[in-house]
Structures are given as structure tokens and as C-alpha cells.
Image (cartoon, helix red, strand yellow):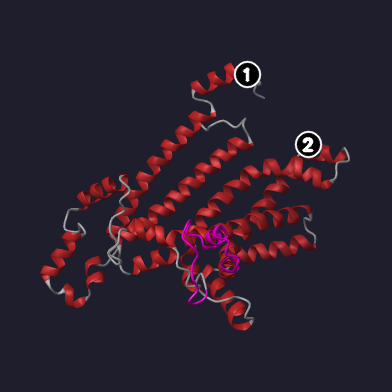
């Protein structure tokens, strides 16, 4: 165990490079290098994709006219060598310029600002559901090991991780919309519905800010089913991982000693099991959030949810390379940010933890 540090000792530790602030600085620098690496890999992959983006965007009649093709390539910089295109793209990216979409003819950053809030809204609700439901089911499954509740939860979690997202989305939409009539339909609001004043881009939050509770209830009702479908896989993963982590910790001697002292089971779980288990659970939760953003393409298309998934699908169909690059950058940045956040939470939960050498 490390000795308790006074103000001078803490200051010395921070300056020596082993404290919390140098740790954050190192992680931020590493994250920036990772983002640059992602731009190179994404740009290289988009260049290797078969197909001609000029033909995909101009159409057959316009593509047969060399003058139109030359003008299109010059406008979007496609007439330059690939290394020059990448260097130019990277330079623009450092200034916040993601380029111009070949399909929408708008700056990609504007498209991302329009579509990303919808994906963030559905992913945030899905993460909230998956974390708390997965954590609860994992704890129940662990403390009722090999009993009926454990068997039921294990079957549910295995089913959740085994079902493809598109099949789950189609089945849920058919059952809850066509058969039962519980789900309101597709989109974010009913046809002709007026969105709330744009503050965050999240309809539920913006409706609450405006005090429009009718729009909030409507937006939440449209949000709930696709968020639940998106959360099913993450719930299954978190349930199984939580169960395994807690069962491993329950076998430790200090847990047996706590039980021998007569502590109630809920106190044993809360004080002696959950905290060490959270270190590994947080890792899975952080990756799950980023994967929900990346995996929302099929779910958004089934529910006609106007988010990043639909934009990525349209960009891929139209060979819109700047649009594809923009989506790749957003998803990669979220992954990197979530890993950074997990590292920070590690330090908060366990201040004794040292950096890996």
C-alpha cells in the first residue's frame, strides 16, 4: 500500500510524471496520435473500395461527358494524386473541415451535425438500459448460481448476444407495431409533428428545455423501441461479463470473511464485490457504448431513424468518400474517447493503480 501523501508529496508526484495530471496528458497525446492513424487507415480503405465515385454521383448520361467528369473531379479534388488528396484532407481536418459530401453537396460537418444527435439520443438510452439492466441481471445471476433465476437469465443473455441486430429489429417492429400496436411507428415524431426548438438536437432533451411535455412523450415513445432493440446485444454481453466477474470475486477469502462476520448479503455485494468488479465491467460498458454507435446502421434503417447510421448507409451506397470518412472519424473518435474515459474512471475507482510500463 502506498503511503498517504501530503501537499508537498502530492506536488512532487505530479511533477515527477506519476500523478493524475501527467497521466491525463499522456492519454490525450496518445489519443491524438490514434485519431491521426485512423484518418490514414480510413482514407486508404476508401481508396481501395471498388467502384467509381464519379460515376455513382453523376449518373450514366453525365458520366459519358468528359467535360462534366473533369469539372466534377476538379471541384472535389479527385483529379489530384492520392497522397496529395490525403495531405490536403488532413490539413483541412485540423481546421475542422471534413470536406464536401459528394451526394448532398453540403459540407460533411453540417451533415454530421444534423444526423449525429439522433444517433447519440438512441445510443444514450440504449447504454442506460444496457448498463443498469445488464448489471442487475448479472448480479442476480451470480448470487443465484445454478438456480432457476440464473438459468433463465443465462438463456436470455445468450439469446441476446446470438441474435443478429437486423433480425431483432425486424421482429420487434413487426410484433410491437403491426401485431400488438404498442409501438408508434418509424421516425422520431409522428408524421407532421413539429420538432422542438433545436438546442441539443436531442428531441427529448429539447422538448424538456422548452417545457413541451407532449412533444417529449411523443419523442420518447418513438425512441424507446429502437433503443431497446439496440440495447439487447449489450445487455447480453454485460450480463454474462458481470456474472463471471462477480463469481470470481465471490470466491475470494475476504468475501468469505465478510459473510462469516454476519454481514447481510446485500452489504457483502455492495461493499466487497461490486467495487472490484466495476473495473472490468466499466471496460465492457465503455466499448459497448462505442459499438452501439457503430452498430446502429441496421437498426436505424429498419426504424427509419434519421441518424448517423442512415447517413453512413447512403454515403456507402453513393460512394460518397468524404461522407464515409466523416462517419469513420466520428465513430473512431467515440471509441478513442470512451477508452480514455475508461482509463480515467479506473484511476478514480482505484487511485492505487499504476500505468502499465
Left or right of 248? Residue 191 is: left
Q: Say if residue 82 shows up in the picture.
A: yes
Residue 205: percent from left, percent from top: 55, 58
Residue at the spot 58% in from the left edge and 76% down from the top edge: 184
Residue 176: percent from left, percent from top: 61, 77
Outermost bottom residue: 179
Q: Magenta segment, which residues? A: 190-217
- For mark 1, give the secondary structure: loop
Outermost front residue: 211
Residue at the spot 14% in from the left edge and 69% down from the top edge: 68
Left or right of 316? Residue 60 is: left
Q: Which mark is residue 254?
A: 2
Q: Nearer the viewer, residue 190 or 275?
A: 190
**Quadrant position of the N terminus in the picture:** top right
Instruction: Say if mark 2 contacts mark 1, CB within 8 Å.
Output: no
Residue at the spot 18% in from the left edge and 60% down from the top edge: 75
Q: Nearer the viewer, residue 147 or 299?
A: 299
In the rendered image, the vertical position of residue 321 relative to residue 354, given as above or below:
below
How far apart are the alpha carbons under marks 2 and 1? 30 Å
Residue 357: percent from left, percent from top: 50, 30
Give the mark, 2 or 1, whose residue is nearer the N terminus. 1
Does the stretch in magenta take in 10?
Answer: no
Left or right of 254? Residue 178 is: left
Q: Which mark is residue 317?
A: none
Q: Which residue is mark 1?
A: 6
Amino acid at each position: 500500500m502506498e503511503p498517504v501523501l501530503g501537499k508537498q508529496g502530492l506536488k512532487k508526484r505530479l511533477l515527477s510524471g506519476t500523478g493524475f495530471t501527467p497521466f491525463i496528458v499522456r492519454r490525450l497525446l496518445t489519443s491524438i496520435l490514434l485519431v491521426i492513424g485512423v484518418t490514414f487507415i480510413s482514407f486508404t480503405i476508401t481508396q481501395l473500395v471498388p467502384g467509381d465515385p464519379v460515376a455513382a454521383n453523376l449518373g450514366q448520361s453525365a458520366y459519358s461527358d468528359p467535360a462534366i467528369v473533369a469539372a466534377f473531379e476538379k471541384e472535389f479534388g479527385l483529379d489530384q494524386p492520392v497522397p496529395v488528396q490525403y495531405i490536403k484532407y488532413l490539413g483541412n481536418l485540423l481546421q475542422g473541415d471534413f470536406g464536401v459530401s459528394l451526394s448532398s453537396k453540403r459540407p460533411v460537418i453540417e451533415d454530421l451535425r444534423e444526423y449525429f444527435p439522433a444517433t447519440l439520443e438512441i445510443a444514450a438510452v440504449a447504454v442506460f438500459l444496457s448498463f443498469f439492466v445488464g448489471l442487475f441481471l448479472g448480479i442476480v445471476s451470480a448470487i443465484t448460481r445454478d438456480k432457476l433465476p440464473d438459468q433463465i437469465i443465462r438463456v436470455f443473455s445468450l439469446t441476446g448476444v446470438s441474435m443478429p441486430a437486423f433480425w431483432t429489429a425486424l421482429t420487434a417492429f413487426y410484433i410491437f407495431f403491426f401485431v400488438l400496436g404498442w409501438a408508434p411507428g418509424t421516425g422520431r415524431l409522428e408524421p407532421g409533428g413539429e420538432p422542438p426548438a433545436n438546442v441539443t438536437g436531442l428531441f427529448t432533451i429539447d422538448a424538456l428545455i422548452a417545457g413541451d411535455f407532449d412533444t417529449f412523450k411523443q419523442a420518447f415513445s418513438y425512441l424507446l423501441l429502437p433503443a431497446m432493440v439496440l440495447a439487447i446485444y449489450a445487455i447480453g454481453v454485460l450480463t454474462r461479463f458481470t456474472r463471471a466477474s462477480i463469481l470470481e470475486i465471490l470466491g475470494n477469502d475476504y468475501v468469505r470473511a465478510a459473510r462469516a462476520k454476519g454481514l447481510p448479503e446485500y452489504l457483502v455485494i455492495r461493499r466487497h464485490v461490486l467495487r472490484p468488479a466495476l473495473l472490468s465491467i466499466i471496460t465492457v460498458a465503455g466499448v459497448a457504448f462505442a459499438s452501439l454507435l457503430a452498430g446502429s446502421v441496421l437498426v436505424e434503417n429498419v426504424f427509419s431513424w434519421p441518424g448517423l447510421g442512415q447517413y453512413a448507409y447512403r454515403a456507402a451506397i453513393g460512394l460518397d468518400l468524404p461522407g464515409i470518412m466523416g462517419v469513420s472519424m466520428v465513430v473512431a473518435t467515440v471509441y478513442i474517447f470512451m477508452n480514455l474515459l475508461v482509463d480515467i474512471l479506473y484511476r478514480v475507482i482505484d487511485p492505487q493503480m499504476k500505468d502499465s510500463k
